[in-house]
Image (cartoon, rainbow, N blue to C red):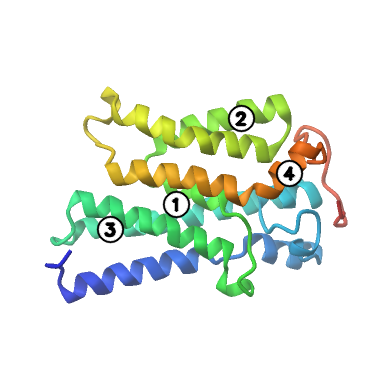
Amino acid sequence: MASWSFITYYCVITMLLIAYVLGSIPSAVWIGKKYYGVDIREHGSKNAGTTNMLRVLGRRAALPVFVLDFFKGFVAVTLIGLMRYDADINSAWLINLKILGVFAAVIGHIFPIFANFKGGKGVATLVGAVTGIYPQIIFLCFAVWCLVFLISHYVSLASMTAGCCFPLLVVIYSSSEWSRNNDVSFTFIIFAFAVAILLLWSHRKNIERLKAGTESKIYIWKSSDNKEAKKE
């Protein structure tokens, strides 16, 4: 790192700022206000994310929010991948920069500059960003999420379970034959455990509601497209 040129530092800082700005795009807030006349942060769980949009405004509102949140994370990390063409950036540092890009995008979602720094939990953005690094692992996490959700109908429980499985799957993947041509760095393994811990912390209120039996269930195959926002 000490041997990086000025232009390398400049590009790295610029890429991380772009990742933050992309993460700051408040899709749930903008879609809710423009098409439904609702500030999603004032309804339901008051979280500007896919789950609250689904619960309050229905599938038609939630789907584009998830897609936009996913791709802003994916694009942020993909852009940082362009740093591979910098001669000062080796493969180890490229992974480290992508991890920093994940954090920048997620922090942007949680504290969006375009929405008074009041956003969501960043799960969809996190998933999109990590997909830009190891899509195979995210596919396995998504399978876990689907299984838990279909059994319990709790989005929060499914997200936490998939998040806790994430570091375990990273460790398994890193020691498997699949990763021979795409080695998983020790930094990424530490990152995966940090993500699991942070995900549990960000869902602490959901954990309390699950314990109390007051967490809302979601049945995606039932009609839930409401014309007006509903408070829980």
Three-letter code, disc 1: Phe
| Residue bearing the label numbered 3 | 82
Report if the CB atoms under discs 4 and 1 are less than 8 Å apart: no
Which element type, helix, strand or loop, lies under badge 3?
Answer: helix
Q: CA distance from mark 3 to mark 4?
A: 42 Å
Q: Who comes first in sequence, dot 3 or dot 4? A: 3
Q: Residues within 10 Å of mark 3 (few under 14, many from 20)?
A: few
In the picture shown, does residue 53 fall above or below 107?
above
Q: Who comes first in sequence, dot 1 or dot 3? A: 1
Q: CA distance from mark 3 to mark 2?
A: 32 Å
Three-letter code, disc 2: Cys
Q: Residue at x 24, y 72 (%)?
A: 9
Q: Is residue 78 left or right of residue 8?
A: right
| Residue bearing the label numbered 2 | 146
Three-letter code, disc 3: Leu
Which element type, helix, strand or loop, lies under badge 1?
Answer: helix
| Quadrant of residue 230 within the rendered picture | bottom right
| Residue bearing the label numbered 4 | 208
Q: Is residue 20 visible?
A: yes
Q: Who comes first in sequence, dot 2 or dot 1? A: 1
Q: Residue at x 39, y 58 (%)?
A: 101
| Quadrant of residue 49 within the rendered picture | bottom right
| Residue bearing the label numbered 1 | 74
Q: Decide which of 52, 171 is in the foreground and name it.
A: 171
Report if the CB atoms under discs 3 and 4 are less than 8 Å apart: no
Mark 4 vs mark 2: give the one in front.
4
